[in-house]
Amino acid sequence: MSALPIEQRLGHHLKRVEQELIAAKTVALRPYGLNVPQYTVLLVLAHEPGLSGAALARRCLVTPQTMSSVLTTLESRRLVERTPHPIHTHILEVRLTRKAKSVLAEADAEAVKVELRLSAKFKPQEADQLIEYLGRCSGVLTEVAAGPKKAR
């Protein structure tokens, strides 16, 4: 038997809620022919046009290989275009097409409905606290992933 029961593991609860959020957004985005990773890329590019694939991978929390696949799909659907950076021509900048902006506007309205429905279950102060708690979780896990600190 484990030293820590599953119902007491914060990581288990975080993962469950993350998967439920992805499932809800998947349903909301399906009519627009987008999955959650594709939607996330479009949303990030709407706020930060011209990012490279590597920068997008970091912002979207996926591997560069996954981002390459997502971008290939979005490009084949004419939702993004990749053009060489004006100075560093080996770097491709990614931008939304006009078509993507239209699709994103509609898809985002549906994704926002999911977010608002989730937020409605909390008083504003509770939502702020939850964001603070999740920030603490992120901070601790970032430290753990960085490995042990070395004494100087």
Image (cartoon, rainbow, N blue to C red):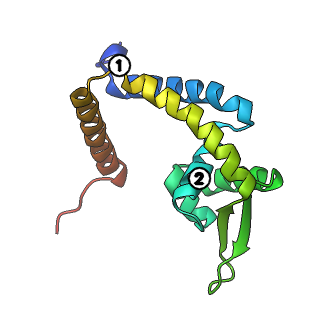
Q: Name the residue rendered at 72%, 67% in the picture.
A: 82
Amino acid on which disc 1 is placed: Lys
Q: Residue at x 35, y 19 (%)?
A: 121
Answer with mark 2 or mark 1, whichever residue precedes in sequence.
Answer: 2
Q: Helix, strand or loop at disc 2? A: loop
State the residue position of label 2. Answer: 63
Foreground: disc 2 or disc 1: 1
Outermost residue, left direction?
152
| Disc 1 target residue | 121
Q: Secondary structure at mark 1?
A: loop
Q: In terms of image quadrants, where is residue 96?
A: bottom right
Q: Whole-percent x and y of residue 35? A: 67, 37
x, y percent for residue 139:
28, 47
Q: Residues within 10 Å of mark 1 (few under 14, many from 20)?
A: few
| Amino acid, disc 2 | Thr
Q: Residue 28 versus residue 61: which sits nearer the camera?
A: 28
Report x, y in % for residue 38. 66, 45
- Crowding around mark 2 (Cα neighbors within 10 Å: few <14, some 14 to 19, many 20+) is few
Give the side of residue 6 with respect to residue 43, left or right: left
**118 lies left or right of 30:** left
Q: Which residue is at 29% across, 50% downward?
A: 143
Q: Is there any visible trace of residue 12 in the rendered image?
A: no
Label annotation for residue 42 = none
> The N terminus appears in which quarter of the rendering?
top left
Query: Label 2 vs label 1: CA separation?
Result: 33 Å
Up-down: is 31 above or below 94? above
Q: Is residue 31 left or right of residue 142?
A: right
Decide if residue 74 is on the left or right side of residue 127: right
Front residue of this view, candidates 3 and 123: 123
